[in-house]
Image: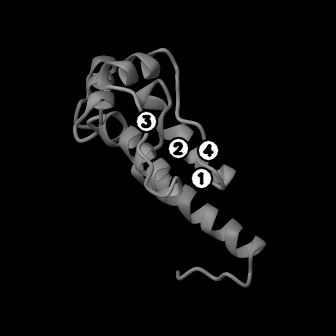
């Protein structure tokens, strides 16, 4: 069974934790972390074999997706920040952009032959 992510389960949980349901931190940040996970897992389905209620229970009990194979630790750290249990503690979109830019700089320094477009 597929887990519904669009305006999905995690956002419903977040709305219960905050009075600002339209804020980036409360709605989209967690989903962005899942999107990063999907990208770095090369398109795998998050929480395979689990239904919506199973995922809700897992996440509310502190469960998180493991890092995809070959995912840089810096990127997985961004994912974990997006999944912080307290929505107000998650990064803003501007902070995420800064974090991603920092990851790109680290990659360019450590792998100079693999220049990324800027």
In the depicted view, which residue is nearer to us: 108 or 49? Answer: 49
The residue at 54%/60% (across/down) is 100
The Cα–Cα distance between marks 1 and 3, rounded to whole angstroms, is 21 Å
- Tag nearer the camera, 4 or 3: 3
Mark 1: secondary structure: helix
Mark 2: secondary structure: helix
The x, y position of residue 52, in whole percent, is 30, 25
- Crowd band around label 3 with a 10 angstrom C-alpha radius: few (<14), some (14–19), many (20+): few
The Cα–Cα distance between marks 3 and 2, rounded to whole angstroms, is 18 Å
* Mark 4 touches mark 2? (CB < 8 Å): yes
Q: Which residue is mark 3?
A: 48
Quadrant housing the N terminus: top left
Q: Which residue is mark 1?
A: 75
Q: Is residue 1 above or below residue 114?
A: above
Q: Which residue is mark 2?
A: 79
- Crowd band around label 1 with a 10 angstrom C-alpha radius: few (<14), some (14–19), many (20+): some
Q: Which residue is mark 4?
A: 77
Mark 3: secondary structure: loop
């Amino acid at each position: 069974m597929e887990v519904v992510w669009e305006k999905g389960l995690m956002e419903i949980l977040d709305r219960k934790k905050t009075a600002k349901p339209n804020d980036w931190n409360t709605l989209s940040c967690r989903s962005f972390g899942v999107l990063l996970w999907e990208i770095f897992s090369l398109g795998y389905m998050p929480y395979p074999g689990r239904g919506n209620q199973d995922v809700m229970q897992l996440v509310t009990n502190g469960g998180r997706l493991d890092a995809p194979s070959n995912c840089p630790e810096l990127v997985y750290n961004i994912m974990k920040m997006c999944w912080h249990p307290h929505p107000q503690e998650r990064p803003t979109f501007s902070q995420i952009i800064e974090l991603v830019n920092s990851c790109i700089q680290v990659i360019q320094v450590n792998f100079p032959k693999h220049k990324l477009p800027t």
